Image: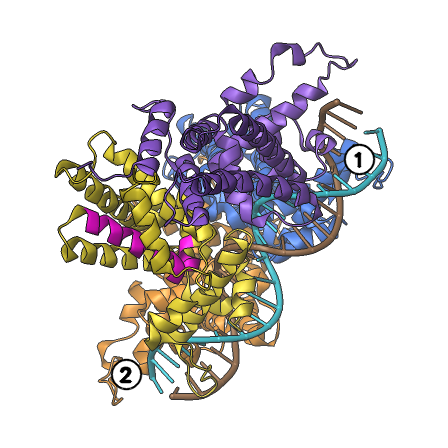
Chain colours: A blue, B orange, C yellow, D purple, E brown, F cyan
Amino acid sequence: MARTTSARPETTRRRQRWPGGYDPENTRRSLIDSALELFERQGFDRTSVQEIADRAQLTKGAFYHHFESKDDLLRTIQEEYLEAQLTAIKKIESSSDDPKARVAELIRFSLTSVAEYRGHVTIFYQERRYLTGDLFAEVTRKRDLVEAAFAGMVADGVQRGAFRADVDARIATFGLVGMCAWAYQWLNVSGPLSVDEVARQFSAMVLQGLEAPA
Amino acid sequence: MARTTSARPETTRRRQRWPGGYDPENTRRSLIDSALELFERQGFDRTSVQEIADRAQLTKGAFYHHFESKDDLLRTIQEEYLEAQLTAIKKIESSSDDPKARVAELIRFSLTSVAEYRGHVTIFYQERRYLTGDLFAEVTRKRDLVEAAFAGMVADGVQRGAFRADVDARIATFGLVGMCAWAYQWLNVSGPLSVDEVARQFSAMVLQGLEAPA
Amino acid sequence: MARTTSARPETTRRRQRWPGGYDPENTRRSLIDSALELFERQGFDRTSVQEIADRAQLTKGAFYHHFESKDDLLRTIQEEYLEAQLTAIKKIESSSDDPKARVAELIRFSLTSVAEYRGHVTIFYQERRYLTGDLFAEVTRKRDLVEAAFAGMVADGVQRGAFRADVDARIATFGLVGMCAWAYQWLNVSGPLSVDEVARQFSAMVLQGLEAPA
Amino acid sequence: MARTTSARPETTRRRQRWPGGYDPENTRRSLIDSALELFERQGFDRTSVQEIADRAQLTKGAFYHHFESKDDLLRTIQEEYLEAQLTAIKKIESSSDDPKARVAELIRFSLTSVAEYRGHVTIFYQERRYLTGDLFAEVTRKRDLVEAAFAGMVADGVQRGAFRADVDARIATFGLVGMCAWAYQWLNVSGPLSVDEVARQFSAMVLQGLEAPA
DNA sequence: AATGAATGAGACTTCATTCAT
DNA sequence: AATGAATGAAGTCTCATTCAT
């Protein structure tokens, strides 16, 4: 996973220092990474705690030492992702005041997330609809914040005359989000086009449209 | 589900032909409908065969009389959906020769599918990535056909100069599909905008873009 | 267990008629009897569902086909016992009007229960304090009814002048119940004294007291 | 628990003798008290070592530093209780020579124990039947001593003509013990009657009987 | 003396599936 | 065509205990 090595190098998995000393932080990370990999490939429900532990070369017992339940792990992953989203969104909101530039940046950032957090994103969209109950209250709250921020930027552009008034901001946002979210199904970091190039094309499509200029 | 009742006219709910008062055709349909409802709400893995049978007011035994396995039911649902998609696509392909009109029609048709086949669509996207093995070979083939048809229409438009050449047809198709597919997460038949109106806005967005005309 | 052979001969365990026909009633009974035996010997918590199933020569799956949970089985056993208690109490209440005779009968009946329903009684007293939650609401209600009936008979005797007025009816009842309940720890059907003889001695003790007459 | 604080005068809560500020004596006591409280409320099997440690604001590690196992703690509690019983019984045996006075004292002492050692008593009776193996050999021995002492006093009274000869001493003892033991299920220190008053009533009941004097 | 990470056995439970009727 | 008893594999989770620090 690109992310664990590039985006958070300080937690790069070291060789188990045990026996000779525990490294709980590292153990926890191993479990999360193991789960990300498996959930992405097989889905949350089709992955057993046993498999997660096995892949991290730990025991089920260790898993339950670090997480209260399988759902607790899912929540952890979701929060990790949403936290990163929120941070990025704040940065975008403050980086520019131009609606078009902002939307372009939003698209670029969304696709980059999909590429870097592939595991998180896949899980996020797959389990999105089943996150209920107290355990996920905070996740739901953050998810709504992220979605509201997306909607806010589009609505702002419409209000300030940068975007066509005959397109409902809400609908446009859904379209935008869908385009980007869907990328988790196909976007390939090692494909022929770079993620930035894909983002550029999506921006062109959303802002200027597909029609060949007259 | 609108479709399942409309596509199955009363004539097929024919008189019971069994001494005990059985109606196998109808029983089978009940099970599928029950599953659609439950899968949509809770997901495939979180729904048990028992629940499906219960909801159809039948027993597990009856379920296994009509389906070889839970996966067989899933396949049935996927094929039902893909069959309808293929039919519609053929109609679109033959209905017009204008790339823009075709894409607009593709969008309209996709959103209509989401609205009408909500259950099928949800399951389709949720389980899309896990359909492997011989059982799903046919499903996979049909899915690829549908996706190729989408890609083909966009590529055709580019080739014929109707769409901008600086946008990769493949990428544009993914964007288009994503926008529409994503609708299963939010599209509300009884919402303020009709499905056709939403389709019109999506078309505007994809073809002319969001930017306010100068 | 005396009870299954004498008190309810119609359910005496037949040889498993399977294959060649199921006998769910019998299966259920086997599981209950197996549990009674094991719970009595090792306690509820120390007995696993696996052991219960093994002893009944069935599988865990069969267990869960007949009971919703281990607690459901516990509830079943408690209700079986309380139902028998309630029936007996009603009979005692209507059999005589003499307080002393009634109390003597109560003692005799209590000890007989202990002897016949040894398993039920042991479990009843062991788990008595932990039966909470909706599942056990009915059990708790019946238990209270039984206890109220005991208290009522003693109070009635005091009120009608058959019992000393300087002994609190509530305290006397607790003493009476304790004497009898405790018998599950020692009463031995094949001991030197018959259950009826033990009951006679308890009655003498409770009614006339231990003191040698002057 | 009244006892644990009164029987352990402040002088034994001596100054911490450990560099880190440890007080092993006190720690051990905390664990026992925590366990007493929890075992009484939930039973031995339903209480985990983790809970015991938590309630004492310690860790599982500390628990295993002070006790070899959960059973070792149980044994400790049982011995604590039986030790106190043995001491009290010796005192009763030497305090009077009159069988009736002795039995009255036995009852008073038993009920007082139940009130003061509620936790110990509850655990004692609940786990009574499961204390096997070498670990509990000593406990079993002491338990038998206590029970023999009870039986002895009653038998002595019969032999000396103080108690009726037509009541089996063994049965009478069981009745007596049952009455008192059972009190752990209902005896309330802050109830309307003092423990001494309850003891007086039990004595009257056992010695003179419930029947109203002619 | 105390910590807390880790283990491993075993607990309860679910569930797709089979099969005699 | 439909039933429902039974199976067996697997799943989530608990917990007493060990051990390096």
Badge 1 amino acid: Tyr
Q: Residues within 10 Å of mark 2 (few under 14, many from 20)?
A: few
Task: Give the foreground label among 1 and 2.
Answer: 1
Q: CA distance from mark 1 to mark 2?
A: 65 Å
Picture coordinates of residue B71 (x, y %)?
51, 71
Q: Is residue C135 left or right of residue D145?
A: left
Q: Position of residue D23 (x, y in %)?
A: 71, 17
Q: Say which chain tag 2 marks.
A: B
- Tell which of A116 and B105 is nearer to you: A116
The chain letter under disc 1 is: A
User: Are discs 1 and 2 less than 8 Å apart at CB?
Assistant: no
Q: Is residue B93 left or right of residue D91?
A: left
Quadrant of the frame with the N terminus of chain B: bottom left
In this view, the residue in front, C67 or A60, is C67
Q: Say which residue label 2 marks.
A: B22
Report the magenta residues as a range: C100-121
Marks 1 & 2 on one chain: no
Asked whether the viewer can see residue C197, the reply is: yes
- Residue at screen point 41% across, 67% down: C66
The answer to whether residue B153 is visible is: no
Q: Residues within 10 Å of mark 1 (few under 14, many from 20)?
A: few
Considering only vertical position in the picture, is D54 above or below D181?
above
List x then y, in percent, for residue D120. 53, 33
Residue A75 picture quarter: top right
Location of mark 1 (residue)? A22
B147 or A69, nearer to the observer: A69
Give the amino acid at mark 2: Tyr
